[in-house]
Amino acid sequence: MRRTMNHRQRGFFHLPNDNMIKTIGVATLLCLVCSVIVSGAATMLRPQQIENKLLDKKSNILSVAGISDPQKTVDELFTQVETRVIDVRSGEYTDAVDAVTFDQRKASKDQAYRLSLAKQDDIARLGGMSKYANVYLVRDQNEISKIILPIKGYGLWSTLYGFIALESDGNTVSGITFYEHGETPGLGGEIENAKWQASWHGKEVAENIGEPVIRLVKGMVDPKSSDAEHKIDGLAGATLTSNGVTNLVQFWLGENGFGPYLKRLQSSSNTTVSQPAATTNTTNGKS
């Protein structure tokens, strides 16, 4: 009794190590200290995380556009890319939001910017989308030479995020890349395979500028087939991911995605649109 009273008088840290109250108290204190350290580190590193994501996004846009120079930084190369925002429904450029700060992924969850999709139209399984979208343009002189469009849609396990690049005709694919997904490595994860991505080069999205018919097929594409220009090799052992890629590409290049914008560009008067007022050479975090 006298020993217990002495411990109480000397305080919490003088309790025996096998004391239940001391064990729980020390564990709780340790958790609090660790939480403060982790939270502090996350807060301090947040600006760097945002900057790294932005740099990665720019790198992917440059990659799909075929722009590279080991002697230049990503930011230096990105001066060749013009960032703009369009109204998805009309296909027209808009200044309603600032292309520098516009976050398309965040906007797709904001009721102020969100568009609902009818179930039969939502083939990419988006659940909804932003009414504004970023587009990235590369010019030769004043004429558009590449059109880079953000794409996303559901595969087997996750939402796939990427970019597709089109030639100035708005119909011929010059490149595709996926930079974020949770598909199975070695199966659906092969969407990151550079050789498979290269197989998209030169493929045509639609016939006679109609609805997109480009699609992944089961197995290898027969180059002698009548519509081989619209077919892409399927991903072996990843049928659902392959279907997801077909659906998301057809959605974003179709009437409910960038279709109205591409039709505007495909008219001769819109392939030489003037430079925007204040939205060039920069972009924001997510697509």
Image (tube, grey):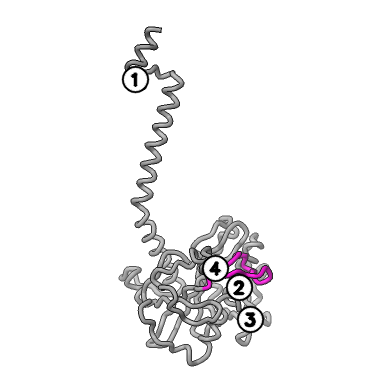
Residue on which the image places disc 2: 251
Secondary structure of residue under mark 4: strand
Query: At label 2, which amino acid type do we have?
Result: Phe
Give how far apart the Cα atoms at labels 4 and 3 are: 24 Å
Q: Residues within 10 Å of mark 3 (few under 14, many from 20)?
A: some
Residue on which the image places disc 3: 211
Secondary structure of residue under mark 3: loop
In magenta, the rendered stretch is: 114-131
Q: Determine which quarter of the picture holds residue 60.
A: bottom left
Circles 2 and 3, Cβ within 8 Å, touching? The answer is no
Residue on which the image places disc 1: 11
Query: Quick one: 221 or 239, which is closer to the camera?
Result: 239
Q: Against 212, is 45 above or below?
A: above
- Earlier sequence position, callout 4 versus callout 3: 4
Horizontal arrangement in the rendering, residue 194 relative to residue 101 (left or right): right
On whether residue 86 falls in the magenta region, the answer is no
Horizontal arrangement in the rendering, residue 272 relative to residue 181 (left or right): left
Query: At label 3, which amino acid type do we have?
Result: Glu
Q: Quadrant of the N terminus?
A: top left
On whether residue 130 falls in the magenta region, the answer is yes
Q: Residues within 10 Å of mark 4 (few under 14, many from 20)?
A: some
- Earlier sequence position, callout 2 versus callout 3: 3
Q: Determine which quarter of the picture holds residue 14.
A: top left
